[in-house]
Image (cartoon, helix red, strand yellow):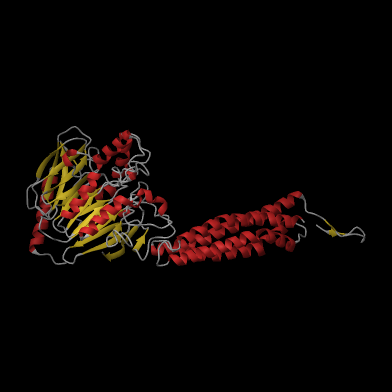
Amino acid sequence: MLAVSDGGTSEPLVERPGVAAQTGAHLAFAGGVLVSTLATVALVYAPGRVAYDVAGRPEPLVTTSAMAVAAGLKLLATWFLLPELYRLGGGHPDIEQTRETMWRWVRWPALGAALSITLLIVGSALEQNQWGRGQAVLIAGAAGLSLSLPLFDIFAIVGSGRGYRR
Amino acid sequence: MKLTRREVGLGLASFAATRCIAGYLPNPSPREFPLGVASADPQPGGAVLWTRYDGDEALVALVWPEAAEGAPIEVPAAGRFALAEVTGLQPSTWYRFMFRAGSARSTEGRFRTAPAPGTRPLVRLGATSCTKDGFPFDVLSRAGERGDLDAFLILGDTVYADGAQNLEEYRAKWAHTFSTGEYQALRASTALIGTWDDHEVDNGWGGDNVTAEQLAAARQAFFEHMPGRTPNGAQVVWRSVRFGDTAEVFVLDSRSERDQAAGDYLSPAQMAWLKGALQQSTATFKLVMSSVPIASYDVPFFSPFADDRWEGFPRSRDEILGHIDELGIGGVLWLAGDFHLACAGRVSLEGPGSSARELLVGPGAQLANISPSFPSGPQFDWASGVNNYAELELDPERGTVRARWLDGRGKVIKELDV
């Protein structure tokens, strides 16, 4: 698609992609979010499973540390990679605009997820050699994460979609 | 390995006797004896023998010393779920047995009679819990391959009869589980001492949440398939089994006699028996088989299920633990299953039971406990979710119980002295 002018007397006109192409772009982004979430789950599960197989018991600190790493990678992917998927819709989408709008939507869930993961790490550290001491904190962290993570994904889709349409 | 002349002689005699007894009989008949054989509750002079017999001929149990130093003893048995109590045997001696009916015979089983009163030999017991049909039974295979366990303790959830409503459905669940080669091998390998938990009746059963008819059917099916000494034929689970002066195993019924309204975990009769028997026991080790743990698991991940165990009945729990503490009854070791994890630790961090220990055994064939954090210090020494059976080596001379948990490959996953 081309950006054309009407003779230099007004703002440039942007040839918008067709509805089908826009829908494809939205679906590509949503699919990217889904894939990143599945990858995050796998990244959390795998080290915990390995630790379990070695010790015959769960190691909360391994799992929560993996959560921190996986969540960080997901955030980076959501920021850097996923908005680029809107290029699949064709034209010259303003990716920076998409990214900034998305961030305005996801920053609070992201902060919530970060705090939740911090709680999970603190809780699992408290569980070391003092069984039960960190479990209330772990439960608070898990509750926060179970709320903030889906919101992060939903808001990323909504926010980036709005940024793309501008 | 060097064999003495006596060992060679005994081996040859054993082989000859086995050929002599089994030789004139046909091969084992799984059609007439579909669930194999079992023995239970050994005493110095005998044991209870069991089989399921699907036939009409007169049934008899044949018992002979494994070392072939005696002639076979014939003990009459009757009924489809046949029990035969053999008596007059030598203490601390391995015996083999089978059932015969007409031209059909069962597979062979073996058991060791209990040590005589006044003796204090080393006693070795196996134990597990929670064996759900559909999960690999390799733990049971490994335990069944052992030839050195004086008895095997079964701490409940042996079958998962959830959903069964009538006697035939309960029987079908038991038959399905006990028809497996692994269970038949284990049950034939040594004497069993068993109790039940909720899944023999229904998931979460706690005494009053199934119909009377359903409970009666479940109870009958349990007693049909899990042999044990019952007073005057009454269907009562709780009892004790003595191994000389080394150990006494107290088998509790932690399910069917609960009274939620009164806060009784055990019936008054069972509680009075347990307190008195513990007080009077002269055994070095007093093993209390409670299908559900008595240890305090007062942490957020386990508290939601406290009503299902001793902790949900604090008066009963304090009563028995306080009784043991106040009288200074030594050598008490609690054994439990149910939690789908193996564990060793103190019963309580403080208060009643703070000096007592509890071991959790199993699961034998189940999913591991789903808690994201397993018991650890300072109250607990160790825990694992690997399917397992435990071996308890009771050494009265050292005054210790060496506990080993073994996985489905026969590998020791934990060993510690209690």
In depth, the one of A156 and B307 nearer the eye is B307
Question: From the image, which quarter does the C terminus of chain B lie in?
Answer: bottom left
Residue at figure coordinates x 46%, y 62% from the top left? A48
Determine if residue A58 is in view: yes
Q: Measured along the vertical axis of the image, is residue B227 above or below residue B405? A: above
Question: From the image, which quarter does the N terminus of chain B lie in?
Answer: bottom left
Residue at figure coordinates x 44%, y 58% from the top left? B372
In depth, the one of A69 and A22 nearer the eye is A69
Farthest top residue in view: B56
Left or right: A44 in relation to B357? right
Left or right: B357 in relation to A36? left
Q: Residue A95: percent from the left, percent from the top?
A: 73, 62
In depth, the one of A35 and B232 nearer the eye is B232
Left or right: B134 in relation to B238? right
Q: Residue A64: percent from the left, percent from the top?
A: 50, 64
Picture quarter containing residue A52?
bottom left
Q: Residue B199: percent from the left, percent from the top?
A: 34, 44
Q: Residue A140: percent from the left, percent from the top?
A: 51, 58
